[in-house]
Image: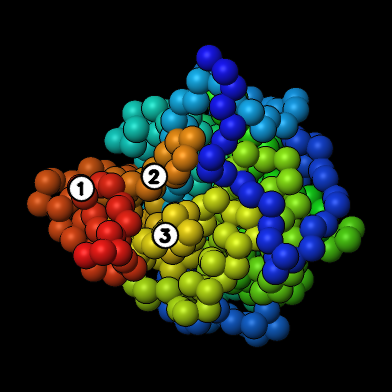
């Protein structure tokens, strides 16, 4: 069969997009949520508050960009929300093992071609806390075994808890992720690393992953020229520049962002505007979390936006909407990206399935808080503008 050009995917930024940056970081060379409800603060304000699993053969480190592809197959990418392994989760993992939280989602995650989760915790044995925080999350390195065994491939460290135990704890986190065989994005040894994508070839296509945080307790967490830290999204320019740059030699650019007002089930207008700007800069999908509850879905220029996919693994104090969770599927076809969502629930330190009544209720609820979409079972469909 003759080669087929991609009809969908990362496009060159238009004339209104931010200018591209030129820094590239070699892949794999990096050694590099609280439950209080308050709006995203200015970074100057204090906010309120490994067994060896078999790697997925379909994903590999790229050797060259791909702009033409033969025999296109769908690519299934899973996104999961905020995960931490402290408090009661730590106790459960210590007693029952690192695989315990993921027993019920492992099969679904492993089926995907690639899986991504937000790591909402420091992974360290350090004890010096950042006193800007009301809650400091610390997880044992062994916890990462569970994520890896469950089928996850990459985590975001762009959030408001990855540096809870200061720079030393953050560096430990990056080292522990390397040791666990988990890729990470959204932070690094310096600003260049923090804003650089991780690239993966999946079924012959180059997919790039970026992550940013719009909720950070102090500017001390911002990655600097020679300072470890996270990729902050208060300033849009480095975010849009990074997307435009990474788009140049990618088939798809996927963006995760930590943002929003905690416990609100709808995004702010500035978030909807920001999502559009990121797509205009070249992003092919936007996935958010941070607010500890699910928010709705939207399509812009036929590209999917999931404003918040909620908590994924949190201690047993979460209940109700804070315990509603699920797995977001972004399925890449040659001419479109489909979006679907499989509901789960956080219960007794596990992610568990619920009955059909719960699932159907979630679909109706998610449709009610989304924008111009209908839920066809798990599938998120754009509404027909003629109707």
Q: CA distance from mark 2 to mark 1?
A: 13 Å
User: Viewer-proximal residue, 5 or 155?
Assistant: 5
Task: Tell me the mark number nearer the camera, choosing from 1 and 3.
Answer: 3
In which quadrant of the rendered image does the C terminus lie? bottom left
- For image coordinates 64% across by 83% down, the residue present is 42
- For image coordinates 12% across by 46% down, the residue present is 356
Among numbered discs 2 and 1, the one appearing first in the sequence: 2
User: Viewer-proximal residue, 112 or 143?
Assistant: 112
Task: Name the side, left or right, on which 45 lies relative to 104.
Answer: right
The circle drawn on residue 377 is: 1
The residue tagged 3 is: 299
Among numbered discs 1 and 3, the one appearing first in the sequence: 3
Q: Is residue 375 visible?
A: yes
The circle drawn on residue 338 is: 2
**165 relative to 106, above or below:** below
- For image coordinates 51% across by 52% down, the residue present is 285
Task: Name the side, left or right, on which 322 lies relative to 275.
Answer: left
Q: CA distance from mark 1 to mark 3?
A: 17 Å
Residue 119 image position (x, y, % from top left)? 54, 51
Residue 309 image position (x, y, % from top left)? 40, 57
Residue 199 image position (x, y, % from top left)? 67, 37
- The quadrant in which residue 204 appears is top right
Q: Residues within 10 Å of mark 3 (few under 14, many from 20)?
A: many
Q: Secondary structure at mark 2?
A: strand
Residue 273 image position (x, y, % from top left)? 53, 74
């Amino acid at each position: 069969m003759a080669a087929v050009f991609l009809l969908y995917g990362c496009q060159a930024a238009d004339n209104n997009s931010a200018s591209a940056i030129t820094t590239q970081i070699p892949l794999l060379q990096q050694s590099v949520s609280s439950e209080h409800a308050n709006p995203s603060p200015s970074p100057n304000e204090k906010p309120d508050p490994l067994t060896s699993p078999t790697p997925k053969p379909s994903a590999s480190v790229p050797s060259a960009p791909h702009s033409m592809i033969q025999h296109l197959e769908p690519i299934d990418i899973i996104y999961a929300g905020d995960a931490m392994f402290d408090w009661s989760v730590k106790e459960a993992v210590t007693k029952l093992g690192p695989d315990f939280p993921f027993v019920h989602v492992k099969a679904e995650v492993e089926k995907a071609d690639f899986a991504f989760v937000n790591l909402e915790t420091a992974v360290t044995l350090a004890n010096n806390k950042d006193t800007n925080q009301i809650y400091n999350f610390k997880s044992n390195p062994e916890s990462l075994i569970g994520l890896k065994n469950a089928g996850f491939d990459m985590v975001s460290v762009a959030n408001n808890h990855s540096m809870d135990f200061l720079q030393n704890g953050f560096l430990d986190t990056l080292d522990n992720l390397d040791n666990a065989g988990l890729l990470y994005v959204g932070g690094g040894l310096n600003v260049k690393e923090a804003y650089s994508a991780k690239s993966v070839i999946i079924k012959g296509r180059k997919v790039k992953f970026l992550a940013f945080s719009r909720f950070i307790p102090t500017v001390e967490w911002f990655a600097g020229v020679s300072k470890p830290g996270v990729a902050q999204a208060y300033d849009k320019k480095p975010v849009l520049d990074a997307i435009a740059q990474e788009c140049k030699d990618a088939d798809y650019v996927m963006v995760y962002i930590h943002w929003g007002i905690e416990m609100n089930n709808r995004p702010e207008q500035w978030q909807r505007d920001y999502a559009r700007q990121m797509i205009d800069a070249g992003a092919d999908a936007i996935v958010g979390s941070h607010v500890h509850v699910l928010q709705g879905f939207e399509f812009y220029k036929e590209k999917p936006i999931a404003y918040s996919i909620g908590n994924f693994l949190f201690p047993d104090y979460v209940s109700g909407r804070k315990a509603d969770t699920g797995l977001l599927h972004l399925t890449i076809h040659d001419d479109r990206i489909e979006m679907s969502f499989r509901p789960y629930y956080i219960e007794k330190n596990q992610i568990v399935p619920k009955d059909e009544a719960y699932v159907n209720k979630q679909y109706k609820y998610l449709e009610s808080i989304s924008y111009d979409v209908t839920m066809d079972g798990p599938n998120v469909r754009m509404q027909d503008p003629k109707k």
